[in-house]
Amino acid sequence: MNISLDLLQLLDAIDRRGSFAAAAHSLHRVPSALTHAVGKAESLLGFTLFERIGRRAVLTEAGRSLLDGGRTLLEAATQLERRARQVASGWEAELRIAVDALIPTERLFPLIEAFYAAGHTTEIRLSNEVLAGCWDALLGGRADLAIGAPGDMPSGGGLHAEALGSVEFVFAISPHHPLASQPEPIASNEIRQHRAIVLADTTRALTARSSGLLSGQATLVVATVESKVAAQVAGLGVGYLPRALAERESARGTLVIRQTAEPRQPTPLHLAWSSSHRGLALAWFTQRLREAETKAALLQ
């Protein structure tokens, strides 16, 4: 290959500075070294890279084409070196965060903004998970940190988990649904006769979990919490929702909250990560996620 990063750097400097002498000064090299390097490259490539117009060195059409594409390579090489130095200093090149569906992703944005504002360049990759999905993402290597992992931690996985808080659920149905006129508390055998709107567990390897579903109850499976809310508003089925969401829709008149004979218990949520992970980006996030103010913002 006759094109090197060193050659592209020389072409870039000459183009930006306008002359071999000015480029040599910016690169702390003598002009003759640049002239020799460009001449050698032209000989190997078989075409001229520069033409001299007065005292200026101007790229030929072929030289311009080479440099325009080469600048992308120079930027990529710079980024690669920067990321390698970052990793060598203990900061991960990438931090993958799995967020449970019970925590709206946008609630993490102020925390991520603070991370960027502090000058950290670790690439953050967010994913959304449901039920056992967060635990599965950690165990399967798809995530480095899980925020809001619900229920009990799987055993024997080498994970560390800390309590984040809990989410309270209420039974919410369309005001036009047949159960809306049932006396409270509504018995489980009455609820079982109606379709439940449930979230699809995103686990790939762990046993899928269900929540708020009665044995033998028909289901409509949806992918997101907001889809579940919309389906219940449409009267397609019944189910438990986080209290904040149910009260939002109740204030709009689109859902009514009803007491049940066997209410759903609050769901404990966790922060979790691999016990062997030692990266500084993970440490930065876990430190701030332990703060009471951050927890309150996530679970508001």
Image (cartoon, rainbow, N blue to C red):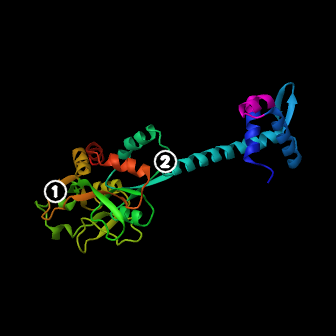
Magenta region, residue range: 15-29
**Mark 1 vs 2: CB contact within 8 A:** no
Q: Residue 147 got which mark? A: none
Q: Nearer the viewer, residue 165 or 229?
A: 165
Q: Is residue 200 visible?
A: no
Q: Quadrant of residue 264?
A: bottom left
Residue lying farthest to the bottom in this orientation: 216
Q: CA distance from mark 1 to mark 2?
A: 46 Å
Residue visible at 24% across and 58% down?
268
**Coordinates of residue 296 in the picture (x, y in percent):** 26, 45
**Coordinates of residue 183 in the picture (x, y in percent):** 10, 60
Above or below, 209 against 63 in this view is below
For mark 1, what is the residue?
258
Name the quarter where the N terminus is drawn.
Answer: bottom right
Q: Residue 122 got which mark? A: 2
Q: Nearer the viewer, residue 136 or 266?
A: 136
Query: Residue type at mark 2?
Result: Thr
Q: Is residue 21 magenta?
A: yes
Query: Residue type at mark 1?
Result: Arg
Residue visible at 24% across and 48% down?
244
Q: Is residue 129 magenta?
A: no
**Coordinates of residue 21 in the picture (x, y in percent):** 79, 29
Label located before the other in sequence (1 or 2): 2
